[in-house]
Image (cartoon, rainbow, N blue to C red):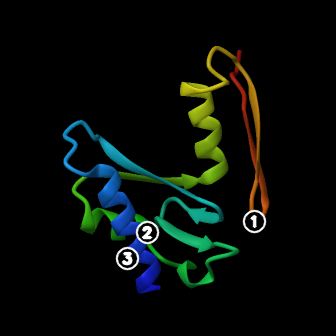
Amino acid sequence: MLYYLGMVKYTIGIDIGGRKNIRGIGCGIGGALDLKKRIILSWSNIKFLDGFNIKNWLKKRFNYEIRIDNDARCFLRGEYLFGAGRGYKNLVGITLGTGVGGGLLLTAK
């Protein structure tokens, strides 16, 4: 577990570097989350993080706002705001990796 978390810290540290314009860190988790308790409930391919509070762990190591969410929701939101979904009112997103995920973004009118 320590090796894996060390790699997460190292990778984020490289990405941030000395940049001054970073507003926060977003983390897409490919598993079930309890967003109120801020813990990973179940992550199918990284079982040792089940029950782990990744948000607090990141906050203690980096002085930025931390947001966590399901990876499929992060992907869909990113496409809606910045990618191929810009300008559309409704989107469907499918993720394929160690499992299958997806989401719907529907604009109510």
Instruction: Name which residue lies at 74% across and 28% down.
Output: 91
Residue located beneath label 3 in the image: 6
The amino acid beneath tag 1 is: Thr
The answer to which of marks 3 and 2 sits earlier in the sequence is: 3
The residue at the point 35 percent across, 68 percent down is 9
Task: Give above or below for 81 relative to 78.
Answer: above
Query: Would you identify the image quadrant in which residue 104 lies?
Result: top right
Local secondary structure at mark 2: helix
Q: Which residue is mark 1?
A: 98
Asked whether 11 or 73 is in front, the reply is 11
Image coordinates for residue 48, horizontal then vertical, percent: 56, 84
Residue at numbered disc 2: 54
Looking at the image, is mark 1 or mark 2 earlier in the sequence? Answer: 2
Q: Work out how far the residue at label 3 is from the one at label 2, CA to CA, in angstroms.
A: 13 Å
Q: Is residue 42 above or below residue 80?
A: below
Q: Position of residue 11 (x, y in %)?
A: 39, 62
Side of 74 where 1 appears, left or right: left
Structural distance between the alpha carbons of marks 1 and 3? 22 Å
* Placement of the C terminus among the 4 image quadrants: top right
Depth check, mark 3 against mark 2: the one in front is 3
Few, some or many C-alpha atoms within 10 Å of disc 3 (few <14, some 14-19, many ≥20)? few
42 relative to 94 in the view: left or right? left
Q: Residues within 10 Å of mark 1 (few under 14, many from 20)?
A: few
